[in-house]
Image: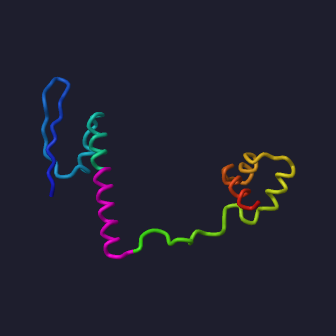
């Protein structure tokens, strides 16, 4: 188990030193605005390293990670609504307005139109 020794300087120039066995316990304990971001940065870096190590172990064991190639769904958010979209375009309604009407982002409408032209 790791033990962390922290020295915190106070505004009056004195130092407070404490030993902590878990930075996770420490992150909620201090309300000091200067210390908390440092503790959180150390924690996020440690989580990143632990995740990378775990993924490397899995790869070494031969486990296939991630989504298989070509397994994306062929069904899109706007599949089956082509006639509705063409009707709205024929009435000179903008792509942004079509997106709002269909509850999707305007770029989703644009990508759908580009794929079906």
Q: What stretch is highlighted in magenta?
A: 44-63
Q: To which quarter of the image does residue 73 belong?
A: bottom right
| 65 is higher (above) or lower (below) than 103 | below
4 or 50, which is in the foreground? 50
Name the residue located 70 percent from the left edge and 52 percent from the top edge.
110
What main secondary structure does the magenta stretch of the protein show?
helix
User: In terms of depth relative to the viewer, which is nearer, 36 or 48?
Assistant: 48
Split into 4 quadrants, where in the image is the C terminus? Answer: bottom right
**Where residue 93 sits: x, y (%)?**
81, 47
Q: With 63 as the anchor, is 31 left or right in this view? A: left
At which x and y percent is residue 64? 41, 74
Give the residue furthest to the top.
Answer: 12
Q: In which image quadrant can residue 2 be found?
A: bottom left
The colour mode here is rainbow
The quadrant where residue 36 appears: top left
Residue ranking furthest to the right: 91
> Where is 49 relative to 5, above or below?
below
Label tally: 0
Taking the spot 29% from the left edge, 63% from the top edge, the residue there is 53
> At 69% from the left edge and 49% from the top edge, which residue is drawn?
106
Residue 50 is one of the magenta-drawn residues: yes
Q: Is residue 18 left or right of residue 77?
A: left
> Looking at the image, which residue is at 25% across and 39% down?
30
For the N terminus, which image quadrant? bottom left
Q: In the rendering, at what x and y percent does residue 37 appear?
A: 31, 40
Q: Is residue 35 above or below residue 1?
A: above
Q: Where is residue 6 in the image (x, y as percent from the top left)?
A: 16, 41
């Amino acid at each position: 188990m790791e033990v962390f020794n922290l020295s915190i300087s106070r505004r009056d120039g004195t130092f407070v030193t404490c030993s902590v066995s878990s930075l996770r316990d420490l992150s909620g304990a201090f309300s000091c605005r200067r210390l908390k971001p440092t503790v959180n940065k150390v924690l996020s870096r440690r989580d990143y390293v632990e995740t990378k190590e775990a993924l490397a172990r899995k790869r070494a064991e031969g486990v296939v990670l991630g989504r298989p190639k070509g397994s994306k769904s062929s069904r899109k958010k706007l599949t089956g609504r082509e006639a509705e979209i063409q009707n709205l375009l024929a009435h000179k309604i903008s792509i942004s307005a079509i997106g709002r009407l269909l509850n999707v982002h305007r770029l989703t409408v644009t990508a759908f139109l580009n794929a079906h032209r």
